[in-house]
């Protein structure tokens, strides 16, 4: 006969209150058995199964099992694969960022470089001169929304048309006002001229944008996707992505990496700085990624892109840091360190790096929004109540 336990024992095993246990029974998640008098009994095996299932859901919402299906990006040991096309291969072959964005959105890679012709664009909202890039973009996107009465049209063609304009406008907004960009030109060319002030950097920036375009259900893409599940317009989905990206555990983590590279300053200081971090028990930002235990392949690709632009002292410092971390900690760099090497090669401060992430990742946010619109499902998980009666 199967072992049974009483309600208090079952609740204790599940880590919930007894009334929560009764709620599981009323919702059909658990079966109760007759006990002595009015008491109920529960099979221990059922309680253990429910506990494992609940723990699996908890893990999936942090770092764990998949929580939804997607045909956009597959994570492999060789890096992300966009609709069957390895992202690193696309970047190395000189694909256009616009073509990769269209691939993510439609599943088909256009021949050649798509022409994203700019239509009428609202003026940029007034911003403090020292506003950081994500703050500028977080104001720009809703500014565009209020100037677009047709933004609630969720047909794929209408969403994609708006996505093209949003990305172009974001790239324009990253540059300082005194460095205007031409109305024509690709997204990478806009960034190369208006943001980096180096027209010859367009090919490198195309590659960087492609490497950042999507990474499955990262925090910002999931935020955009949840927003899309409520049938919010594409500007709202991009705004949700920007809000999540602004956190120091996501898009602005690269600024911590930049501060580490600045602390090193010169290649010969890398070993001393790493040893000091080890002594203080501090982690090295810019190293390791849970999805790539053997090393983030996007980092090597982006470091290669950075080298094409030159190796000023801080790029040399970043490369020396990688050597020391590999020797002392067996640690491999992630894409954040690759991005800082790129911005240093461009002569830009680390605070500018999240802006480039945002422009590239918007392609992925829109892809997830389109896929979620098509599913028609509302993403609405449940919480496990653990509080008291109040």
Image (cartoon, helix red, strand yellow):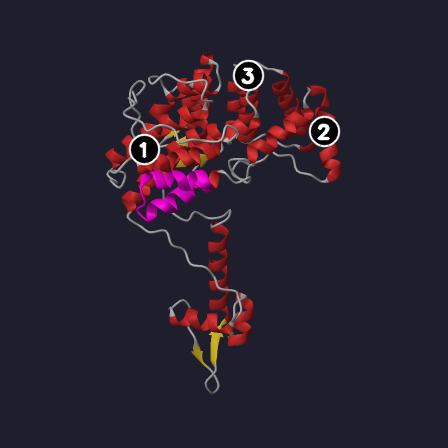
Q: Residue 288 location, x and y as percent? A: 58, 35
Main SS type for the magenta part? helix
Q: Which residue is mark 2?
A: 273
Q: Secondary structure at mark 1?
A: helix
Q: Which residue is mark 3?
A: 307
Judged left or right of residue 68, residue 300 is right
Q: Earlier in the sequence, mark 2 or mark 3?
A: 2
Q: Is residue 6 visible?
A: no
Judged left or right of residue 32, residue 295 is right
Q: Residue 99 location, x and y as percent? A: 33, 24
Mark 3: give few (<14), some (14-19) or many (20+) Cα within 10 Å: some
Q: Secondary structure at mark 3?
A: helix
Judged left or right of residue 13, residue 356 is left
Q: Secondary structure at mark 2?
A: helix
Provide the residue span drawn in magenta: 217-243
* Magenta residue check for 297: no
Q: Which residue is mark 1?
A: 105
The CA distance from mark 2 to mark 3 is 23 Å
């Amino acid at each position: 006969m199967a072992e049974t336990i009483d309600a208090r024992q079952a609740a204790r095993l599940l880590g919930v209150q007894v009334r929560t246990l009764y709620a599981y029974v009323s919702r059909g998640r658990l079966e109760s058995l007759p006990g002595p008098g009015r008491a109920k009994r529960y099979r221990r095996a059922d309680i253990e199964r429910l506990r494992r299932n609940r723990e699996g859901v908890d893990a999936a919402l942090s770092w764990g099992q998949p929580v939804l299906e997607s045909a956009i990006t597959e994570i492999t040991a060789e890096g992300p694969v966009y609709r069957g096309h390895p992202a690193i291969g696309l970047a190395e072959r000189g694909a256009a960022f616009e073509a990769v964005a269209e691939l993510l959105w439609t599943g088909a890679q256009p021949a050649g470089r798509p022409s994203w012709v700019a239509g009428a664009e609202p003026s940029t909202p007034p911003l403090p001169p020292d506003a950081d890039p994500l703050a500028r973009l977080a104001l720009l996107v809703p500014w565009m929304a209020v100037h677009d009465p047709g933004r609630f049209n969720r047909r794929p063609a209408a969403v994609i048309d708006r996505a093209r304009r949003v990305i172009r406008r974001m790239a324009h907004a990253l540059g300082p006002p005194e460095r205007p960009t031409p109305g024509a030109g690709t997204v990478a060319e806009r960034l190369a001229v208006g943001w980096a002030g180096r027209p010859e950097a367009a090919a490198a920036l195309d590659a960087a944008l492609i490497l950042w375009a999507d990474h499955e259900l990262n925090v910002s893409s999931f935020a955009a996707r949840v927003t899309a599940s409520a049938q919010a317009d594409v500007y709202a989905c991009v705004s949700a992505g920007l809000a999540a990206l602004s956190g120091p555990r996501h898009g602005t983590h690269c600024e911590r990496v930049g501060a580490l590279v600045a602390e090193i300053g010169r290649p010969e200081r890398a070993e001393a700085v790493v040893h000091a971090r080890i002594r203080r028990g501090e982690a090295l930002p810019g190293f390791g990624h849970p999805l790539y235990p053997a090393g983030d392949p996007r980092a090597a690709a982006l470091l290669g892109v950075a080298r094409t632009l030159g190796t000023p002292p801080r790029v040399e410092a970043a490369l020396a840091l990688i050597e020391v971390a590999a020797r002392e900690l067996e640690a491999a760099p992630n894409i954040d360190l690759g991005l800082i090497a790129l911005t240093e090669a461009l002569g830009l401060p680390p605070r500018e790096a999240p802006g480039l992430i945002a422009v590239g990742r918007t392609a992925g946010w829109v892809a997830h929004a389109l896929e979620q619109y098509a599913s028609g499902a509302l993403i609405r998980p449940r919480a496990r109540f653990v509080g008291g009666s109040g």
